[in-house]
Amino acid sequence: MPRSWARRRLIQVLPVLAAASTGAAQPSYASSAAGNAVLVDKSFGVKGDGRTNDRSSLQTAIDQSVGQTLMITGDCRIDALGLALRSGSRVRFAPGASIKLLPHNESFYQIMRIWDVRDVKLEGATLDGSRELNAAPNDPHNGGYGMGISIAGSSNITLISPTTTGCWGDGIYIANSYSSKSTWPSDIRVLDHRASRCRRQGVSIISGANIVFERPVWESIGGTLPSAGLDIEPNNNLDILHDIRIESPTTRNCRTGILMYLQMLAGPKPQYVQIKITDHRDEASAFAPLDISGLELKGAVVKGRIVIDSSKWVSPRLSTLRSEDYDRVHGPQIIVSNQRIIP
């Protein structure tokens, strides 16, 4: 599960490489389906041949295409330092294009960082953490911090049809800024996310306001705890969970379908939680389709509502909501309606 020391370590990530010199090749253009001009990654020296380390060239392309659309066209490979998107970035992946990590031994990475920026759109991203090529120690109790897409302290972010596979940690991780712990992410919209074969989570939501996932599929998640399709788990009392909406998610072959562990939210600052999950379909979760646990208030104030509507659980190991160590009297109200159990 996310822990505060892991967040401190995030701050120590090596800085992103600076933009390339002005002697870079002049970018070429192509037309999108809508007739708009886009910049092509190969104009910046990206090989996309499935062998070359394209990280530096891709970062240059990202830095020099702000405000325009950058098209990723090839079978790109990068090292585990990853890529940073900028405010105003527009990145689109052509059909069949992908970014995959080269063989490495890192348990801690972000393939794409969206940190302390705003107004970003990422379309069709296919990101592979190369789990099968990772030589990091396979500790089932630790080391799950290799992220496909990491969003921290950013706003107005749209991800359309992202695919994150084989990540050492989470497919998508959403948290407060690492440079200003009270700056939360906001206005995050993710459409049709698919995560598979990630070791820790399909998605972790640590903090944020107005976060929406529509029609995600999180499957075959496992290798280090908690191994959930979705984990909503604040790290501390500065985090928030305001207007979190998960619409028509599918969880399949995960340890836990959807987990909410809220203990770290309790503290001196009063909190109000708003979470709504609709039309959740779970298939073959090994532990539980839904687990809302870990909120012992001990005088702290955490109010709000957690609404679970129209769930469909197929052959669940537990046919009811699992809820342990949760203050049902003083904590956020849990409302479950229109639930179906499918044998």
Image (cartoon, rainbow, N blue to C red):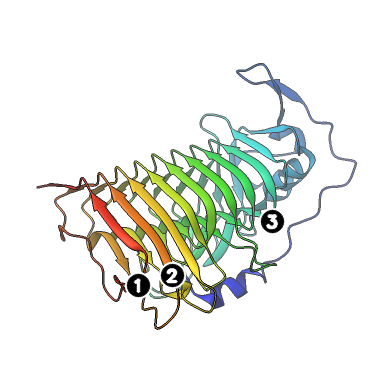
Q: Secondary structure at mark 3?
A: loop
Left or right: where does residue 178 sit relative to residue 220? right
* Rendering coords of residue 109 (x, y %): 57, 62
Is residue 168 at all visible to an observer of this figure? no
Question: For the view shown, which residue lies furthest in the right direction?
Answer: 22
1 or 2: tag closer to the N-terminus = 2
Q: Nearer the viewer, residue 291 or 34?
A: 291
* Rendering coords of residue 17 (x, y %): 76, 56
Identify the mark at residue 302; answer none if there is no mark. Answer: 2
Is residue 306 at all visible to an observer of this figure? yes
* Rendering coords of residue 204 (x, y %): 46, 59
Q: CA distance from mark 1 to mark 2?
A: 7 Å
Q: How many marks?
A: 3
Q: Nearer the viewer, residue 298 or 239?
A: 298
Comparing labels 1 and 3, the label whose residue is closer to the camera: 1
Q: Secondary structure at mark 2?
A: strand
The residue depicted at 76 percent of the width and 39 percent of the height is 66
Contact, CB < 8 Å: mark 1 with mark 2?
Answer: yes
Q: Nearer the viewer, residue 237 or 122?
A: 237
Q: Which residue is mark 3?
A: 116
Comparing labels 2 and 3, the label whose residue is closer to the camera: 2
Q: Vertically, is 170 above or below 77?
A: below
* Amino acid of disc 2: Val
Using the rendered view, name the quadrant where residue 47 is placed.
top right
1 or 3: tag closer to the N-terminus = 3
Identify the mark at residue 330; answer none if there is no mark. Answer: 1
The residue depicted at 41 percent of the width and 54 percent of the height is 275
Contact, CB < 8 Å: mark 1 with mark 3?
Answer: no
Left or right: where does residue 336 sit relative to residue 202? left
Q: CA distance from mark 1 to mark 3?
A: 34 Å
